[in-house]
Amino acid sequence: MNAVVFDMDGLMFDTERVFVQAWDYAGEKMGIGKAGFMTIKTLGMNVERSRQVWIEEFGDRYHEEELRSYSREFRDNYYANNKVPVKKGLYVLLDYLKEHGYKLAVASSSPRWEVEHHLKDAGVFDYFQAVVCGDMVSKSKPEPEIYLRACELLGEQPEDCVALEDSRNGLLSAHRAGMRVIMVPDLWEADEEVKQFLWNMCADLEEVKDFLLEHPDKK
């Protein structure tokens, strides 16, 4: 293994729980009730695919601009008063990977402005040689495009890269790209289909480091 590609929301940062709160807030403001449950329904999706799921759920009661405005209002207030919530083991794992010469990338379905904000806020932006975001690809996870693009930018073949993911769509995306896949569960628990192709499942990112120490399959 020459490289590791990280998902972001729910994997590096505990931002999916912030989204639950933001969409509860936005849903109540819009008059459709708390909508935080849509976080689970759209895990790993880019904006376009997520939009389709919202329309399927709420029909003509869904107003994208209102959702975006109220959600942004909540998150701007949250991040004005709080640092991005970092998941356990992130710094330990990044330091280990950097020390051992792995190439690193991010493959996140979130828009670029948000990805860069969170990476910089947590002080980890400079660890990564490549960042691929949802608004930089045409097909959302679970399609493999975003992971194939990340491997391409790193100059590595997918079979020589590890993907770290927490969502079903993200796990399928990385698997379909031909990568080794490690799951670190967050809001979603693996089903039997996903369990069949996982290289490993780790409780947190520090456990990922321990697993890679035990399996130093680096070229």
Image: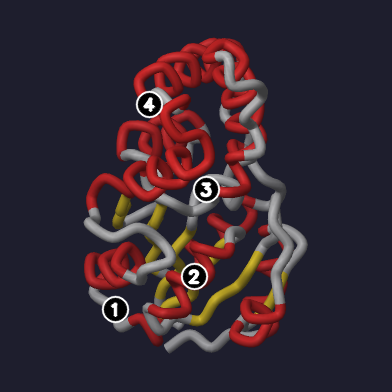
Q: Are discs 4 and 1 less than 8 Å apart at CB?
A: no
* Residue beneath the point at 49% across and 53% down: 44
Check the image and report above or below for 54 versus 185. above
- Which residue matches tag 1? 156
Q: CA distance from mark 1 to mark 3?
A: 29 Å
Q: Are marks 3 and 2 in contact (CB under 8 Å)?
A: no
Q: Quadrant of residue 17?
A: top right
Nearer the observer, 139 or 180: 139
Q: Which mark is residue 112?
A: none
Q: Tag 4: Cα neighbours inside 10 Å, few (<14), some, or many (≥20)?
A: few
Q: Residue at x 49, y 63 (%)?
A: 170
Vertically, is 213 above or below 26?
below
SS at circle 3 = loop
At label 3, the amino acid type is Thr
The crowding category of the residue bearing disc 1, from other C-alpha atoms within 10 Å (few below 14, some 14 to 19, many at least 20), is some
Q: Which residue is mark 2?
A: 163
What is the x, y in percent for residue 96? 57, 63
| Residue topped by disc 3 | 42
The secondary element bearing badge 2 is classed as strand
Tell me what residue is drawn at x 52 percent, y 19 percent: 75
Task: Kindly indicate the quadrant of the structure image that contains residue 152.
Answer: bottom left
Inspect the image, locate mark 4, and give the three-letter code of the amino acid beneath it: Glu
- Earlier in the chain: of badge 4 and badge 2, it is 4
Query: What is the C-alpha distance between the residues marked 4 and 1?
Result: 38 Å
Q: Nearer the viewer, mark 4 or mark 3?
A: 4
Alpha carbon separation for disc pair 4 and 2? 31 Å
- The reply to whether callout 4 and callout 3 are in contact (CB within 8 Å) is no
